[in-house]
């Protein structure tokens, strides 16, 4: 079985310090929007953040980083793997950034299919670009990731993915990139235009 974690622990510096998870798009905050897309695809879903979400978590488990400092999304992936390892029969963890509101409905299924032949991990790719935070990780990678973070040589998800080994899974970007991520107010305006075009 596959569990899922929404990575919402970023600093949101390019959004003026606003908690990106709570930024609204089309009358719905990004956290709720992604939760609605990812939840049906996984056995259990949690949120990685160091913020106090309270009721805004929607009843989902909130997983703070377990590493001191700011090791970036890898710390969120690690927290997710630690949580997933406590869930019976869960073998993999799907991760997605909270700022990717158009996550495909077949995101987890396609990554899982790519891992069915024993691939160490699967990363989403669209328009030739890899999205390393939108990925599927075996729970068995937990100890290896812990050692990588403790080594302190890199905070990059891509660096760890290359060490662990991965396959890239292509998703079509027909009208727009399904992994479009919102980092700035300008990106938010672009996403709003995408959303309006879909309606």
Image (cartoon, grey):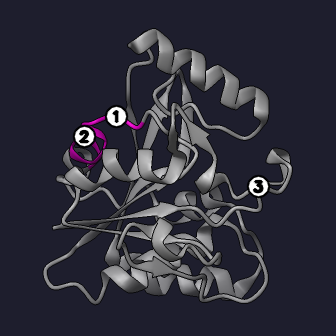
For label 2, the residue is 110
Side of 190 where 39 appears, left or right: left
Above or below, 108 against 67 in this view is above
Front-lying residue, 5 or 199: 199
Of pointers 3 and 2, the one earlier in the residue sequence: 3
- Give the SS element for disc 3: loop
Residue linked to disc 3: 18
Spatial distance from mark 1 to mark 3, Cα to Cα? Answer: 26 Å
User: Residue 109 at x, y = what percent?
Assistant: 21, 45
Quote the CA–CA distance across marks 2 and 1: 10 Å
Is 38 magenta? The answer is: no
Work out whether 137 lies above or below 87.
above
Residue range (magenta): 103-111
Query: Which of the two discs, 1 and 3, sits closer to the camera?
Result: 3
Q: CA distance from mark 3 to mark 2?
A: 33 Å
Q: Quadrant of the C terminus?
A: top left
Residue at figure coordinates x 79%, y 83% from the top left: 69
Of badges 3 and 2, nearer the viewer stands 3
Residue 57 spot, x, y in % from top left: 45, 69
Determine which residue is flagged by label 1: 104
Name the residue at 32% across, 44% down. 37
């Amino acid at each position: 079985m596959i569990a899922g974690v929404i990575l919402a622990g970023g600093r949101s510096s390019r959004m003026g310090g606003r908690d990106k998870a709570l930024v609204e798009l089309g009358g719905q905050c990004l956290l709720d929007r992604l939760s609605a897309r990812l939840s049906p695809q996984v056995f259990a879903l949690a949120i990685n953040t160091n913020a106090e979400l309270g009721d805004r978590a929607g009843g989902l488990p909130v997983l703070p980083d377990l590493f001191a400092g700011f090791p970036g999304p890898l710390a969120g992936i690690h927290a997710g793997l630690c949580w997933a390892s406590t869930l019976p029969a869960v073998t993999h963890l799907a991760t997605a950034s909270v700022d990717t509101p158009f996550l495909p409905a077949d995101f987890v299924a396609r990554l899982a299919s790519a891992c069915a032949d024993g691939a160490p991990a699967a990363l989403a790719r669209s328009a030739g670009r890899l999205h390393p935070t939108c990925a599927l990780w075996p729970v068995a990678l937990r100890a290896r990731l812990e050692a990588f973070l403790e080594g302190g040589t890199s905070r990059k998800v891509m660096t760890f993915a290359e060490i662990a080994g991965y396959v890239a899974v292509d998703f079509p970007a027909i009208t727009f990139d399904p992994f479009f991520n919102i980092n700035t107010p300008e990106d938010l305006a672009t996403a709003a235009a995408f959303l309006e075009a879909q309606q």
